[in-house]
Amino acid sequence: MFIELFNIIFPVLLLASIGFTWVRLGYDYPTEFVTRLNMNFGAPCLVFVGILDLGQDLPSMSSFMIASFVAITLMFIISSVFVFATGLPKRAYITSLSSSNCGNMGLPLCLFAFGQPGMSLAIAYFAVGTFFQFTVALFISHGNMNFSSLFRIAFLWGIAAALFFILNDTTPPMWLMNTTKLLAGVTIPLMLMTLGASLATLKVIKMGKIFSIGIFKMALGIGIGIATASYFGFVGIERNVLIMQMSMPVAVFSYLLASKYNRNPEEVASLIFITTLISFITVPLMLTFLF
């Protein structure tokens, strides 16, 4: 069991530590540039390839994406109630607590733990989660959003392209598949190194308060994941991927929003750092006892 856990978790930790160490040594890491590159090119290609892999079972994919949407919505509602009840800064904490690092951490963990089928399902969750971040989370942080801005979300074009080929029962041309697979292949390593680079620049404040909130966030995500998977009757890989993605720490994207719109960025940064550390404990425990 230890060897299996090591094989799943070590690649994630190693790549993240490369980015972390690189920044700690004083070298420049263009986090904003790499993030923009991933979101505009890597993520659309990753979603395109992943949804095509699930295309042979469109009803199952649709059911999983609906379940992902339900789980994320529940996370948003309960997080909002918690923030209002505790008097925390609303825009900062609702956005961060309702998010999950389903891309940087969730995708590689699901790949190593559950293989390519798990990776494809994780990408489907990632598509729903990223859409939430670029719509609801952005609206909460900014306070305004135009409908036309949806057309600038690049990964939606990746979904549309994949559905076009699936619904028309046609195979994408070889040049397109080769190109998208190349771009998709470098996306996850870049995500992990960017995660590490981001963690290297974050500073923890209000340790006791943030740690308690972090425990609540992680427990809530796992609980909602288990409940939603049970409600939809998921078993096997579908159940495991949904729970794994829901159990991920606060998304780094939350800090980008908090920093850009001045929504308590120091506290959001602390929450990201603490929940990421907590996940290094919860993920092995889930892999051992839950899956």
Image: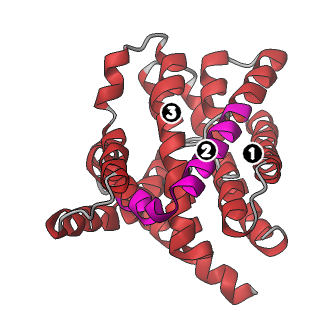
State which region is magenta: 49-74
Q: Quadrant of the N terminus?
A: bottom right
Amino acid type of the residue tagged 1 in the rendering: Gly
Observer-nearest of 228 and 77 = 228
Residue at position x 24%, y 66% in the image: 177
Residue 255 visible from this viewpoint: no
Observer-nearest of 166 and 278 = 166
| Between discs 1 and 2, the one toward the N terminus | 2
Q: Are marks 1 and 2 in contact (CB under 8 Å)?
A: yes
Amino acid type of the residue tagged 3 in the rendering: Gln
Cα separation, mark 2 vs mark 3, equals 10 Å
Residue at position x 36%, y 26% in the image: 150
Residue at position x 62%, y 51% in the image: 64
Q: Position of residue 208 (x, y in %)?
A: 80, 38
Q: Residues within 10 Å of mark 2 (few under 14, many from 20)?
A: many
Amino acid type of the residue tagged 2 in the rendering: Ser
The residue where tag 3 is placed is: 133
Cα separation, mark 1 vs mark 3, equals 16 Å
Image: 70 above or below 54:
above
Asked if the stretch drawn in magenta spans residue 225, the answer is no
Residue 221's tag is: 1
Q: How is the image coloured?
A: secondary structure
Q: Position of residue 262 (x, y in %)?
A: 49, 19
Q: Position of residue 218 (x, y in %)?
A: 76, 47
Identify the element where label 3 is drawn: helix
Q: Are marks 2 and 3 in contact (CB under 8 Å)?
A: no
| Between discs 1 and 3, the one toward the N terminus | 3
